[in-house]
Amino acid sequence: MTEISTNRVDWRALWASGDLARFCFISLGILLHATNETMVATVMPAMVGELAGVQLVGWSLAIYELGAIVAGAAAGRLVSYVALRTNMVVAALLYAAGALICATSPSMQLFLAGRLVEGFGGGALVSLAFVSVERLFSRAIWPQLFGIMSAIWGVAAFSGPMLGAIMTELLSWRWAFGIFTFGGAAMALASVIVLNTPEATRPQATSGKAPPFPFIALACLAIAVVLIASAGVDIALLRSSVLMVLGLIGLALFFYIDALKPRSRLFPARLFSWRTPVGAGMTMVAAFSVATCSFGVYGPLLLTSLHDIPLLTTGYIIAAESIAWSILSILVANAPPRRERLIIVGGAVMIACGIAGFAYTIPAGSIPLILMCALLQGGGFGIAWPFLTRVIVASARHDEQTIASAAVPTMQRIGYAVGAALAGIVANASGFSEGLNHDAAANVATWLFLAFVPLGIVGCLAALRTSTTANRLQEAIG
């Protein structure tokens, strides 16, 4: 491990020691996972055209995020008992196996099984990348390394849709997943060679101090997401309503059980209480995460079905949303604290306007207007999220600040999983249950986004409440 005695990083010395090359390799896990996550929407039209099963499109993201949540929580604990290198090899092989199943699937059902396995592998790779920084590198350079890892997410957000569109246009959607099969296998093989330090080849000695794995809570979450997603398949009023209610009960049970287990807790106390900045802030995270995934899941499918817009164009639009997120995050990073409230609320309003705007622009097929809505949605996240995260962490109890910092991305993933499942219900109830055709797509294009406008309003109210309670807390402390 290269020790750095000052805040200035000697990148040349870091490279000479081999640590920088090792870090670049570890970060490939994030790139594989994030690129795959953003790619699937652009290959969806071609895939549905071959495999059918448009009723199960919402499952493609829901099942992937569910696997990532479970594996991410497990990987952070397994390194206490199994060597980091072994964990990395197994995670990469799981990822490669899932991608191979997706690439060779003869049916949508088998494709979804592959997505679940991919999610397990990808979620573990991301978690292990952060663990690797803590285990293998000097604390003095953690901020710089974490900053690079954040930039990798931005690269993946752009490269994923582009890769999917290009591979589908030139070869086949199957080759888009085939690339990830080779990537996962290569990473597994290289892990044996690259992760050869003592810190990576032996378990971390914890004497049983590692927090227990939240089996029961995550089982409730998994069952809840599956029930909600199942409610949208073969729409029938009684059956779908019962499954939906049971799924929501399972989701509430997940949060309740998590609150009862202090040693394995994933979220801070009083999670959704609007009396605290933490509760209001986490409500905002949940509301917007659920409300905004419709375009990422169904956008390219609707645009190609309704307006024959090329896949590459839809890829650019989705990538533009992510680029707006990254650029605006950088532009507002140094804003003074007194503008925090305005920035959080302004970002929330931008996101809500993007959600509502899609309900008009997607049926109309105006590419400039669709792009504007995507930029509003992505830019709103870019403006609000850094400050919202800071408020949540700073307002949490001292003994829960670490939990609070990890809770924001965890809640986002849960929101994406639940949102994709709910989007499947709306899409199938609006017409996709009868199959993919122009009339069904036209009906779905309107209702799919209007249905989530109320959650956008909840997100705006939670943003206002977050900033208000945060200001009161600062005044009380001051």
Image: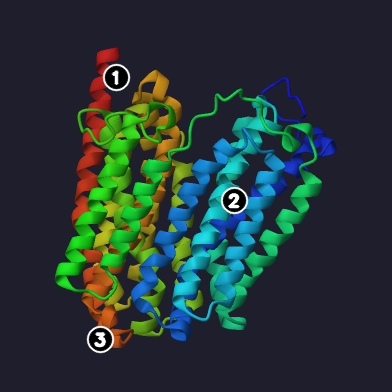
Count residues near mark 3 (Cα–Cα under 10 Å), then give few for <14, some for 14-19, many for 20+: few
In the image, what residue occupies the spot 78% across and 35% down? 14
Residue that mark 1 sits on: 474
Which secondary structure lies at badge 2? helix
Judged by depth in the image, the label closer to the viewer, 1 or 2, is: 2
Give the quarter of the figure containing the N terminus. top right
Tell me if label 2 and label 3 are in contact, CB under 8 Å: no
* Image position of 365 (left or right of 106): left
Q: Position of residue 339 (x, y in %)?
A: 33, 32
Task: Quadrant for the C terminus, please.
Answer: top left
Give me the C-alpha separation between circle 1 and circle 2. 36 Å
Q: Closer to the observer: label 3 or label 1?
A: 3
Residue at the spot 66% in from the left edge and 26% down from the top edge: 205
Q: Of the residues shown, which amino acid type is indicated by label 1?
A: Gln
Mark 2: give few (<14), some (14-19) or many (20+) Cα within 10 Å. many
Give yes or no for contact between labels 3 and 1 (Cβ–Cβ under 8 Å): no
Q: How is the image coloured?
A: rainbow
Residue occupying the point 73% across, 59% down: 186
Q: Earlier in the sequence, mark 2 or mark 3?
A: 2
Q: Secondary structure at mark 3?
A: helix
Task: Look at mark 2 in the image and give the residue it sits on.
Answer: 30
Mark drawn on residue 439: 3
